[in-house]
Amino acid sequence: MEKITDILNYTLYDGITLAHVIGLIVLIMIVNYVWKKLSGKERPNIYEKIRCLKCGWVGEVSKYHRVCRKCGSNNVQKSPG
């Protein structure tokens, strides 16, 4: 057991030990996990990429309301990708 504490107390740089580095890595992993949980759900996949046949605009619109955001035309075509 003393060998483990000796390894953890090994000084890497000016008072910073291996235990400090391991603790920091664990803390970053915990904060990252909590951040992902609190950041909310991903956007639902109700959007599709379209190209307006009237003005040529390309972008994402709702699958349920396929209207060009630039000119308001409903003459749109599903764009590959």
Image: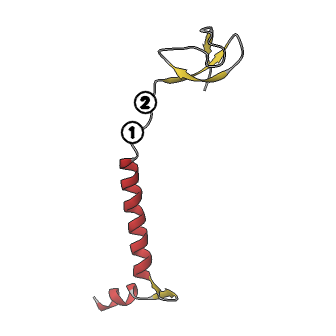
The image quadrant of residue 81 is top right
Question: Residue at (59%, 9%) from the top-left corner?
Answer: 74
Question: Residue at (33%, 88%) from the top-left corner?
Answer: 5
The image quadrant of residue 71 is top right
Question: Residue at (39%, 39%) from the top-left corner?
Answer: 41
In this rendering, the count of numbered labels is: 2
Q: Position of residue 61 (x, y in %)?
A: 55, 21
Reply above or below: 32 against 2: above
Label 1 residue SS: loop
- Reading the image, the residue beneath label 1 is 41
Q: Position of residue 58 (x, y in %)?
A: 66, 22
- Packing grade of label 2 (10 A; few <14, some 14-19, many >=20) is few
Label 2 residue SS: loop
Judging depth in this view, the residue of 81 and 21 nearest the camera is: 21
Reply above or below: 63 against 19: above
Reply above or below: 51 against 9: above
The three-letter code of the residue at mark 2 reads Pro
- Where's the N terminus, which quadrant? bottom left
Q: Is residue 5 left or right of residue 81?
A: left
Q: How is the image coloured?
A: secondary structure
Question: Residue at (40%, 62%) from the top-left corner?
Answer: 29
* C-alpha distance separating marks 2 and 1: 8 Å
Say the numbered circle drawn on residue 44. Answer: 2
The three-letter code of the residue at mark 1 reads Lys
Q: Are marks 2 and 1 in contact (CB under 8 Å)?
A: yes
- Packing grade of label 1 (10 A; few <14, some 14-19, many >=20) is few
